[in-house]
Amino acid sequence: MTTPSIEATDSRNASRHGKNAWLACGVVGATLLALIALGHDGRRIAQLAVLAVPMVLWLAWPLRSARMRRVRTVAVWLWAMGFALDGVARAYLLDTYQAAPDGAMVLGAAANTNARESSEYLRMHWRSAVIWSAALVVAGVLVGVFARRGAVAVAMPDAQASSVRTRMPFWTRSLVLVLLLVACVAYASKPWRRLHPVVFWTQWSQSVQSLRGAWADQQDMRDRSLAQAKAIAPVFTQAGPSTVVLVITDSINRDNMALYGYGRPTTPRLLAHKAQAGDQMAVLQNAWSVDASTLPALRNMFHFGLPQSENSENSKSSENNGNPPHLLALARAAGYKVWWISNHDDLAIEQQHARFADVVDMVNRTPGRASASLDGEILDCVQEAFADTSTDRKLIVVHLMGAHPHYSLRFPANANPFDDSVDAVETGLVNNGRPTWVRRFRQEYDAALLYHDFVVSELLQQTRSAGKPDEYRAWMYLSDHGQEVGHGSDRAGHSPSTASGYRIPAVVWRNKGPLPSGAAVQQPFRADWTGWSLMDLLHIQWSGQMPERNVLGDTYRWQAPDIPVAVESFSR
Ligand SMILES: [Zn+2]
């Protein structure tokens, strides 16, 4: 049996070890948090911290065997270095390119790089590489030193051991328990789990691999499309210069535009253009997309709404027999120089459409919903395209974020005039029983539209004032799809299942040539037929023409599209 004095020493030892262990947790945890905060922002920091927490807490768990403690030290160190590498890599990319690792640019660069290029790159960027590596080394040493100081279980008779173990105060135990519970929830949720460095970077390297694989094909596909377009031999039928601008926006529902009769003044500038331009500008009153998301919508716009032919898989090596041509390929074959200026960063769109252009400008390099680059950023690039003197046939495609969720990222801070007074729109939403959060989204959505009105009007102004007054210019604006923001249901976002997901604006301006006017602007228009009207704006003739699908022509015939929602009437 032990004497009282030895027991006291043991328990002092245990409490010293206990304090050490909490200090170890604190230092390792703080180091991790600092590195996480370097590479992530906002809610992401909390999510990553929760994912990291179980291993850090392990340091507070008393272990008796020295071998287990060594295993723990190594495990905690590796774990922490995983988060550290992730944080540093992200911080480096943000700092250098304002880009996230899964952005098209970074993925593309990683997929494109060979050993020689990597060494060239390192030679150029060694300074920042040294700085970030130093941060990593400091973190490694700190974590290494403190991970060794995890809790030790002091050998002593069973009765005393249990009394020492219960010395952890109640609130500490509760806190640890809550943290572990939250961590369990985090690991159970797929979107959270995906943020874990090991999962994220494993998937990242898979994306790079599959991109590498797919690329050869895409370049091949574009080469075949260009050859196909040359074989079609489209003809430019006009004398003199021609400048055509196509503005494709994202997630704009025409019901929210004052231009289309909305109750809030969301489009003052476009209304002013309309008043000024008279019959040079047609606002197509009943425009519809036939797709509720971007990729299929753009595919249809640029392939004339024609389906891929069924034998396309077998005909890879020969000509695209039966496959619809790509509009940009046709424009180039007819002598147009093509620009693609985008505030999106989407790999698929870049590969399937943008890379057909002679000049590609991807202004926004952070992918997905968190990307906060405002659409106005593209205006300078568009001005440069207008100023280009190397050609007198220009097709400038501008791809905007429009009002893509999150709406609050689509307009400048403090530029929401719709959130401080109760107007008719607000009252209407209240009467329809829309909850507060939907009404708040609607206010933000409308503020996004107001900013959008500025960008779109600037683009129209640039087009109207480009070149000499007698030179032909045309401009077409439409959205890839609509958006539901409490229009017919308590929801906000893309909406394949309600008509709001398909109700888009479509506006055409040109300084020469007929446009629909009077009753003709009431004819419904479908976005998958955009190509047929664009060929009219471009003055290109080709063998595949279908005049009955050109909304600008006299022989236009509306046909209702097959969309997965019941639409009472396409004429309203
Ligand atoms: Zn979209």
Image: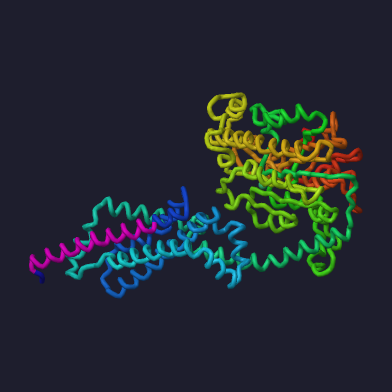
Q: Position of residue 376 (x, y in %)?
A: 63, 41
- Left or right position of 310 against 502: right
Residue 24 visible within the image: yes
Residue 185, visible in the rendered structure: no
Instruction: Verify whether residue 22 appears in magenta.
Output: yes
State the extent of the magenta-drawn residues as a range: 3-32
Residue 307, how many percent across, how many down? 81, 55
**Quarter occupied by the N terminus:** bottom left
Instruction: Please determine whether, in this image, residue 491 is positioned above or below residue 92.
Output: above
- Rendering coords of residue 118 (x, y %): 56, 69
- Quadrant position of residue 184: bottom left
- Residue depicted at 68% across the width and 32% down the height: 257
Give the x, y percent position of residue 566: 74, 40
Who's the residue at 30% across and 66% down the image? 145
Closest to the observer, 251 or 127:
127
Q: Residue at x 77, y 33 (%)?
A: 283
